[in-house]
Image (cartoon, helix red, strand yellow):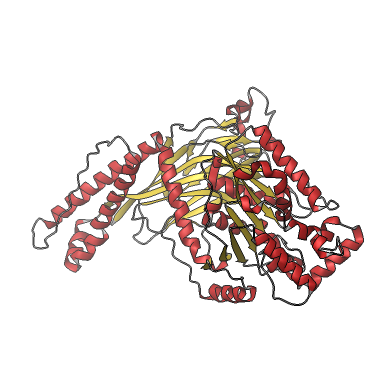
Amino acid sequence: MKTQIGVLIHLHKFTNIDLSTQGIYQIRVSVPGAQPYLIINSTRQEAISVNEVDENHICYPENIHHQYFYSQGFLIIYEDEEMLTNVGCAFRLEEIQLNSNIQIQMDLLFLDIKSLPDIHSQNFTQNVIHLHSKMKPISHASFQVPNPHHYNQMYYPVDFDTNHFCSVQTQIFTTPINISFAKGFVEEQLKLQLDAFINQTINVLNENRNSLLDQLSKIQSDKKIIQLSYKVQEYNIKNPDLIKQINQSFYDLHHDLYVLWCELISILKDNNLSLLTLLQQDYCEQMKQRWMNCILSYSSQNKNISSHVNQELAKNKRHSLKNTEFQRIIYTEAIIPLNSHPFFFRTTYQRQALHQMSNDFRDHYVVLLHGYQGTSYDMRYWRAILKIRFQDQIKFILPTSNEFVNNKSIQQQAQDVADEIIDYINHERVFDFKLSFVGHSLGGLIIRAALPLLRQFQIQMHSYISLGTPHCGYASSKSFIIDTGLMMIQKWNKCKTLQELSQKDNKNIGSTYLYQLSTFEGLEWFNNVVILSSHQDYYVPIQSALIQSIEETNDPKTLFYNQMVSNIQSKCKRIDRFDIDFQITKKKLDKLIGRAAHIEFIDNLLFVKMFVYLFDEFFI
């Protein structure tokens, strides 16, 4: 038996997320054992973006060379720069065994800007032609097609690796184009088991035919007439012309598959955006379905999260969880065992029925705010994944006024952040927009403190998300290392922020800044109030991060602490609480002192992906 497989790779758009080095970039694709034979240039359907690569900086055309397909080569200089490649290639794999997999390799090629002539020269593209041979692979992505004898389609936002962080919107299609048998093989199969033979060959081909036909019908709006040949029929083993009938069925099915394959190529050329949108939606649903295995509890009961119970549940689940088979085309670097994923415990506090405001705003601005002594760069993964998931639906505000700050009060920092946000929105000249916030650690407190200063935007408020934020300070801390560290830092540099976090800024706890902050307005304006913690985070007490009360005692600090919790909760119609269990493999000081989990909220790319895709309702 011989099988010919068609493989289509389409690269829609390249986006620079966090490429550290300027230079020429290019995508190279290969399918071991296959020959590229057709380049597919798609008709542009999008408006020109302000972030697009200058046409004078498109250095090399797309081409086929030996077993490789090359996209355009383009010069990347700026952050967020985009290259609408809009190009694909068809490969032909002549022979493949029945139970074999197809491997697809995608390489990111690079040539440093230091090796280039003057990039501002009018003859720049002519001057770099001879340098193409010096481009070297710096990262790669690999794919596996586990069922090549079936029709397969998949979309992936290929991001290579965090050291070469970019995104390539990639579509992959495979289908058998031709399956042929020697006459003796058919006769032998008839003697053995006709039903199994038909089920594994003709019926599978017919399923592929119908899958392709169904996919094309979703895209084509003009009811285009396609001439197909195959007719479903019963095969009678006593019929002397049975082999002839089977051969005719194979011929008709191959004809139909080839016609539909050509039609798919035509759609990629003329109407790629519609197909891309369908596959993107399918990708989101597939990843959600897979990652749902990592949500261990979902409750609407108004009860506290137990860190000890969650820790034991997560430990047991990791040991028992079997990796679910991913039946689609597998992005090898991205589809990793589920037991190495973060696990989510979710509970929902709901005081009254929630009536969300209209979401018909045109623009959505998301403020990303770093933690203590951090920078806006700390939030790069959140910015990157939100951009990949929602494309141009979200715009970002990354305040920089508090970078490396350690001697300002929380209120002073909040004033600076509020001023930046107001200036940014005024400069944008927008009115119909949504405004959301994601704050890590101290950033979550600064956002809360800034809300009264942003009262003019209260009807635009959509989601407030805090990541490991000490909402109620450190009164519930049980970490001797952290308590001692806070005390030493305060004595050393008289840090106003840490004094306020530990409620040492006033002898009367009811007059401390954090207690006063618990009475501030703002959280009641949001459709979604979402707070995340980790029971592995010893930097921020889990009760404080989740705004949860602690057991009643006669200790005045505890009484004031619980009153702060009550003050904050009373403003919120609903609070979604998440306790995250990370699979932390680091064996450094960060893990020893409990800091590792605290920074996982911003440094764990897989966690950020999972949260954004699983709970995308917070950003829509």
Image quarter in which the N terminus is found = bottom left
Of residue 254 and residue 36, the one placed in the foreground of this image is 254
Tell me if residue 128 can be seen.
yes
Q: Quadrant of residue 98?
A: bottom left
Q: Is residue 46 above or below residue 598?
A: above
Of residue 139 and residue 232, the one placed in the foreground of this image is 232
Of residue 354 and residue 78, the one placed in the foreground of this image is 354
Residue at the extreme top: 122
Q: Is residue 206 above or below residue 224?
A: below
Q: Position of residue 87 (x, y in %)?
A: 47, 37
Q: Quadrant of residue 398?
A: top right
Q: Position of residue 383 (x, y in %)?
A: 63, 47
Q: Is residue 337 above or below residue 130?
A: below
Of residue 473 and residue 293, the one placed in the foreground of this image is 473
Tell me if residue 163 can be seen.
no
User: Does residue 246 appear left or right of residue 399 in this picture?
Assistant: left
Q: Position of residue 415 (x, y in %)?
A: 77, 45
Q: How many marks?
A: 0
Residue shown at 60% from the left, 39% from the top: 25
Q: Position of residue 437 (x, y in %)?
A: 65, 49
Q: Is residue 271 above or below residue 563?
A: above
Residue shown at 81% from the left, 48% from the top: 412
User: Does residue 491 appear left or right of residue 511 in this picture?
Assistant: right
User: Does residue 50 appear left or right of residue 120 in this picture?
Assistant: left
